[in-house]
Structures are given as structure tokens and as C-alpha cells.
């Protein structure tokens, strides 16, 4: 399983627009083949900062989503709202305690 984390900082006046984009696309993303989990986090002290946390069956499943029309459409609407470049990375769970 691949865990994908994407940290995004939005212009303060664009936060609500991002929330609307996420609301309209979250079920479609979650329904993508290989997507096992999707969660949205918001920073407690910087309300314009959000993080998506998703679990994917494999890197191929994530890449299939990233190559999809759904991703292209969602990302093109989202990236124009950024205050700074997003930080994205993929990890694997090593140990649960």
C-alpha cells in the first residue's frame, strides 16, 4: 500500500473555493480503482493550509488517477488557488504501534 500526503497552502480568500472543489470531487476520487482511503486535514493554526491523506493499492493505481481526466480537471481548478507551491510525497507504513 502507498500512502500519499499532499500539503497545500491557499490564498486566504480562496479557501472556501478549494473546499467546494474538494466537496465536489472527493467521492469521485475515492471511487477510483485502487483508492482505499481519502481524508482532508486542516492546520489548526494556519486555516489556509490543508493536507490530503490518501491510501492507494499501488503506485500504479495512484499514477492511473494522476493520469485521469478527473485529476487534470480537479488539479487545474485547485492549483490556481495556491499561495505557495504544494508539497507532495508518497510513503509506506513501516510499523503501527
Image (cartoon, helix red, strand yellow):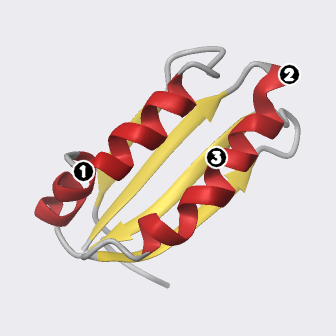
- Left or right? Give the position of 84 relative to 10: left
Which circle, 3 or 2, is nearer the viewer?
3
Specify few, some or many for label 2: CA neighbours under 10 Å numbering under 14, 14-19, or 20 or more: few
Spatial distance from mark 3 to mark 2, Cα to Cα? 14 Å
- Closer to the chain start, of discs 2 and 1, is 2
In this view, the residue in front, 92 or 64, is 64
Label 3 or label 1, whichever comes before in sequence order? 3
Horizontal side of residue 35 vs 23, given as left or right: left
Q: Dot 3 surroundings within 10 Å: few (below 14), some, or many (20 or more)? A: some
* Position of residue 93 measured from the top left corner of the image (x, y, whole percent): 33, 70
State the residue lying farthest toward the bottom. Answer: 97
Residue at disc 1, secondary structure: loop
In this rendering, the label closer to the viewer, 2 or 1: 1
Q: Residue under circle 2?
A: 13
Q: Which quarter of the picture shows residue 4?
A: bottom left
Q: Position of residue 15 (x, y in %)?
A: 79, 34
Identify whether 70 is placed above or below 85: below
Q: Tag on residue 68? A: 1
On the image, the x and y values in percent for residue 2 come to 27, 65
The residue positioned 52% from the left and 25% from the top of the image is: 79
Mark 3, residue position: 21
Task: Report the residue at 56% width, 19% height from top.
Answer: 80
Residue at 59% of width from left, 33% of height from top?
8
Left or right for 46, reference 64? right
Describe residue 48's horizontal placement relative to residue 34 as left or right.
right
Secondary structure at numbered mark 3: helix
Q: How many labels does the image show?
A: 3
Image vertical order of residue 30 relative to residue 70, above or below: below
Q: Which mark is residue 94?
A: none
Q: How far apart are marks 3 and 1 (CA)?
A: 16 Å
Specify which label sits upstream in the sequence, 3 or 2.
2
Amino acid at each position: 500500500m502507498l500512502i500519499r500526503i499532499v500539503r497545500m497552502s491557499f490564498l486566504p480568500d480562496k479557501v472556501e473555493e478549494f473546499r467546494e472543489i474538494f466537496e465536489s470531487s472527493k467521492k469521485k476520487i475515492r471511487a477510483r480503482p485502487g483508492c482505499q482511503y481519502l481524508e482532508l486535514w486542516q492546520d489548526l493554526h494556519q486555516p489556509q493550509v490543508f493536507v490530503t491523506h490518501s491510501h492507494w493499492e499501488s503506485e500504479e493505481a495512484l499514477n492511473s488517477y494522476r493520469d485521469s481526466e478527473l485529476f487534470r480537471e480537479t488539479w487545474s481548478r485547485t492549483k490556481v488557488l495556491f499561495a505557495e507551491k504544494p508539497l507532495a510525497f508518497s510513503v509506506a507504513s513501516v510499523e503501527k504501534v
